[in-house]
Each structure stands twice: as structure tokens, then as C-alpha cells.
Amino acid sequence: MSGRRWVASVVVAVSGALVPIAGATEAAAMAPALPATTVITGDACPTAVPAGTLSDGSAAIGAKKLCDRAVAAARSPQARTAIRAAFHMLGAPYACGDVGRSAAFRFDCSSLVSRAYAVAGIPSAGTTWSPSTRDLVPWDGRKLASWVRYVAPSKVLPGDLVLYSTGASLSRHVVMYLGSGYMLHTNYCGGVAHVERFYGFPHSGSHVFLVARRVVVPNSSAPKPVDLSRSTAARATTVSFAKLIAHDRATTIRVQKALNDVVTVGLLVDGRWDGGLFAAIVGFRRFGMNMSDNITAPIDRATIRALGKKAGFTLVA
């Protein structure tokens, strides 16, 4: 899950795209022994995948049928291509400790999804770099990656990316949602890219939902945030905690805008109350307030008061 790593590299052609092999010595040491015909392509779903890469009942469905279903329900041609590419990545070893994450057939969670979309023509990864989950949540001063936008959990479609906190304060994980109750990802040293049951949108447990992202098609008309330059919510110097808890739209918009300004979380400013807003508030509590992960209350006065101090409003009852 590291950030961009710039290294001397050579490349191989993969379905018309250039895919990096990290520096030749690293590639020789870290790349798995694979048939010369191993190809990542977004042209068609694979008819067969490596043994052991389909779990939790997905093997009974079959890779091609599961892939075809996901492709049929995807939102864009780019998402369809990325899904096919991700299925061709099944069986690739996990890039433990970030080592080899730019090799031709080795991934960590974020390099897998970003390079699958790169095959589809999205500027999500380059020949020598892939973004990290820090670019997709984001945190620690990072800006949200330009090629993704917020999508509500209730509207997630195959090809969308779902991010989780996995315990440690800086531990983030991203998966590609497939529909049919499954996801495709890679997530542990010694493991490989595989399909398993979708984690869902839990607010507790070992995989705490943070936010869902949809990949933006170049030159598309992605939904724009509400213009708050002339709204009462934008000029408001106070935020009512009671109204916020009651899901008042104007109050929620004010808090969404504050979160975007303070922690650059990339929320769509629409006044809707859902898992994305919850995740953004949790993210501010963890990183904007420099507090521990042990706070369990979804929304608390101390957090909103601290947000107000940084965003220019005062919390009232």
C-alpha cells in the first residue's frame, strides 16, 4: 500500500498497454515463475483461472460467469475492461512490504485495482508507479486521486472500489466490488489475488468500511458538488448538533463542506447522510484531531466542535 515508487524499469506489452517490470534485478528476484503466455487483458473474461483463487462458493459459479455478470452490471466501458483485467490478475502473488508492486504480475491491493483501470485507459497508474490507499481515502495531507469520486454505498456497482480500515491507525485496504456478493482483491503476504465474499459496509469489526469510490471516465460529466458560495449553510457561523443528528440537509451540507476543506476527503456535498459521511468524520477524528482509533461513537460533540474550530464554525446545541 505504499505511495508512488519511481525506479529504473523495463516494460512488457500487455493488451496494448505498457506494464512495468520493476528494475530488472528486482524483477528477476521477485517475479514469480509464470508461463511466457501470461497476459493481462481487458478484452474478454478468462475461461479458466489458477486453482485456489475462487473461494466462498465463487468456484461453483465459475470465473467466466462471475466475470461476465460483473461486466454486464458495470457502469462504464472502462469499468468493464478493468473487471476483465482484474480477473486476468488472479493468482498473482501479493507484493509483501511493497516489494515488487510494480512488477508485471505482482500486486498489493491498491496497485491491483489501479493497474486494472490503467489497462482500461484510465490515468490511474504509470509504467513505474501505482497510487496507494492514501490517495483514495485520503489522509495525511494527500489530495484525493483525480480519477475517482465518491459514490454512496447504496449505489455501488461492479468495478467500484471499496475501502476499509483494517485495525492499525494507518492500515487501509481497497477491494474491487464484483456484485453477486463477491469482491476481487489481494491482501496478505504469501497470498495471491483472489475472489471471496464481499465484506460489505460494516462500521465495526476487522474490516471497518471507510468510503466507496467510482472511477471517473476521462472527459465525463461526473456529478459536481453543490455550489455553496451563496447558500446559508456556507455562510453559517454555527452548526447545531441537534440538527446534525436529525440529518438536517443544510447542516449536513455545512459539515460535508467542512470535512472536504479540512481533511480533503472528497465527499459529494449533497446533504445526504450515509456511510461516506460517517467514514469522513471518523477519518477527521483519527487524523485531523490526532486521536486514537479507540473512539467508538459515530458522531460526538467533541469531534464536531474540533472540526468547527478548523473550518470556521461554532458548535451549538
Image: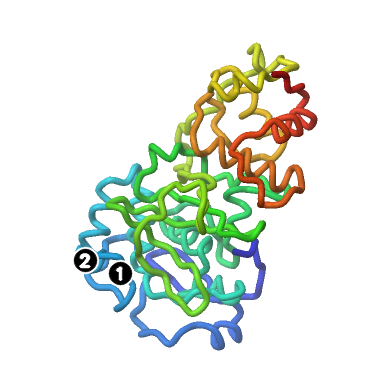
Residue 193 as seen in the image, left or right of residue 282: left
Q: Residue at x 27, y 52 (%)?
A: 180
Residue 291 or residue 68, whichever sits in front = 291
Label 2 neighbourhood size at 10 Å, few (<14), some (14-19), many (20+)?
Answer: some
Q: Amino acid at mark 1?
A: Leu
Determine which residue is flagged by label 2. Answer: 62
Q: Residue at x 56, y 54 (%)?
A: 165
Residue 290 image point, x, y percent:
76, 48
Residue 133 image point, x, y percent:
58, 56
Up/down of 262 relative to 55, above or below: above
Residue 93 as seen in the image, left or right of residue 225: left
Do tag 2 and tag 1 residues touch (Cβ < 8 Å)? yes
Residue 111 image point, x, y percent:
52, 63
Coloring scheme used: rainbow
Determine which residue is flagged by label 1. Answer: 54
**SS for callout 1:** loop
Q: Amino acid at mark 2?
A: Gly
**Disc 2 to disc 1, C-alpha distance:** 8 Å
Up/down of 264 relative to 23, above or below: above
The quadrant of the image that shows the C terminus is top right
Residue 140 image point, x, y percent:
72, 50
